[in-house]
Amino acid sequence: MPPIEERTPPAGIFEEYAILSIQDLSRMCAVDERHIVQLVEEGVLSVVDADKAEWHFTGTALRRARLALRLEQDLEINLAGVALALELMEEIEQLRRQMRLGL
């Protein structure tokens, strides 16, 4: 079986408006669907169609899920810590954008 990097396309291929099923997301992240559910429950990922029987995610969820999994695996951070780290990383990026715009 080829390495994960060869089996899953890079996150940059998907546009923000692309819609992924939970099966797509779990396959592209090489994790079980239950782990995706845990990421949603912890607030790491947001579901687009929560009212329907099957969850769907935007294309940006793939990038966020892969980043969350790297934090979780490489740094051994639990899911609550991953959620906090991602929130802080996004806040830093937002502040940097504001500084560049002179706000």
Image (spheres, rainbow, N blue to C red):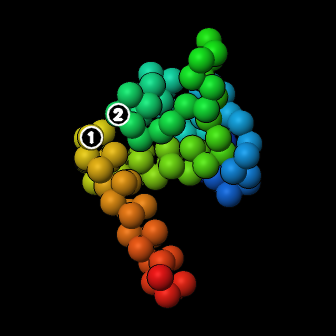
Check the image and report above or below for 17 versus 40.
below
Q: Residue furthest front?
A: 103
**Left-right relation of 77 to 20:** left
Check the image and report above or below for 93 versus 58.
below
Residue type marked 2: Glu
Percent x, y for residue 62?
58, 45
- Callout 1: SS: helix
Residue type marked 1: Ala
For image coordinates 33% across by 60% down, the residue present is 88
Residue 9 seen in the figure:
no
- Give me the disc on residue 25: none
Task: State the residue in front, 44 or 77.
Answer: 44
| Quarter location, residue 61 | top right
| Quarter location, residue 56 | top right
Q: Does label 1 or label 2 sit earlier along the sequence?
A: 2
The answer to whether marks 1 and 2 mark residues whose Cβ atoms lie closer than 8 Å is yes
Check the image and report above or below for 83 versus 48.
below
**Left-right relation of 44 to 63:** left
Task: State the residue in front, 65 or 6.
Answer: 65
* Mark 1 closeness class: few <14, some 14–19, many ≥20 residues within 10 Å: few
Task: State the residue in front, 63 or 29.
Answer: 63
User: Which residue is tagged 2?
Assistant: 42
For image coordinates 46% across by 69% down, the residue present is 94
For image coordinates 56% across by 51% down, the residue present is 63
* Mark 2 closeness class: few <14, some 14–19, many ≥20 residues within 10 Å: some
Q: Quadrant of the N terminus?
A: top right
User: Which residue is tagged 1?
Assistant: 80
Percent x, y for residue 10?
65, 53
Q: Disc 1 versus disc 2: distance between alpha carbons? A: 6 Å
